[in-house]
Image (tube, rainbow, N blue to C red):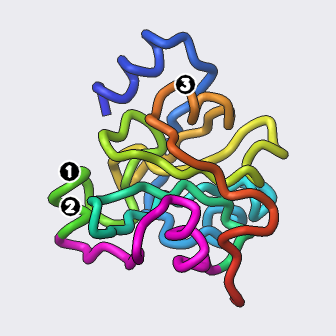
Amino acid sequence: MDQLRTLLQAKEVDFAIIQHEKPIRTAQEGADYFGIALGQTAPTIVVKSEEGYFALIISGSRGRVNLPEVSERLGCNSLKMASPQEVQKVTGYPVGSVPLVGLVLPCVVDRKLFRYPFIYGGTGEPHSTLKITPNALQQLNHVVAFLDERIGMGNP
């Protein structure tokens, strides 16, 4: 967590790290806990292709992501969800705690997140949440693509 705080302070990003007693496991739990719109929650999902791993930072309102469409956008043959063991290995964090920023993986960011002044997501630790501006995602990650309003949406 100190590494995250140091990175955010060094880049002069507007942020807050919010502590909570229980881990927040779903976007809906996060929206309810913080009293925010579901779309302001920003889970980080790790997927893999023949090229390697990617982090998808999506709006909690998106529902399921259509991986074939995202794969096409990235120029990959296919994408599939990384296993919990793979997520831990490539990020250093367990599923559900992958931080929003400072990732070594190439990132795909959901444009829906830019509707909000702040978004809420992982810190790398299950008992805290990062509140940050969506623009900071571009500043602090290696963003290789965006999901727009249409692409990447699957049936919930």
- Say what amino acid the circle numbered 1 marks: Gly
Label 1, label 2: how far apart the Cα atoms are: 5 Å
- Say what amino acid the circle numbered 3 marks: Gln
Q: Which residue is mark 1?
A: 92
Residue 127 drawn at (x, y percent): 40, 53
Q: Which residue is mark 2?
A: 88
Q: Is residue 114 above or below residue 8?
A: below
Depth check, mark 1 against mark 3: the one in front is 3
Q: Residue at x 25, y 73 (%)?
A: 84
Q: Which residue is mark 3?
A: 139
What SS does tag 2 mark? Answer: helix
- Say what amino acid the circle numbered 2 marks: Gln
What SS does tag 1 mark? Answer: loop
Label 1, label 3: how far apart the Cα atoms are: 21 Å
Residue 80 drawn at (x, y percent): 38, 78
Q: State the extent of the magenta-drawn residues as a range.
A: 64-85
Tell me, yes or no, whether the two marked residues, 1 and 2, touch with CB atoms within 8 Å: yes
Residue 68 shown in magenta: yes
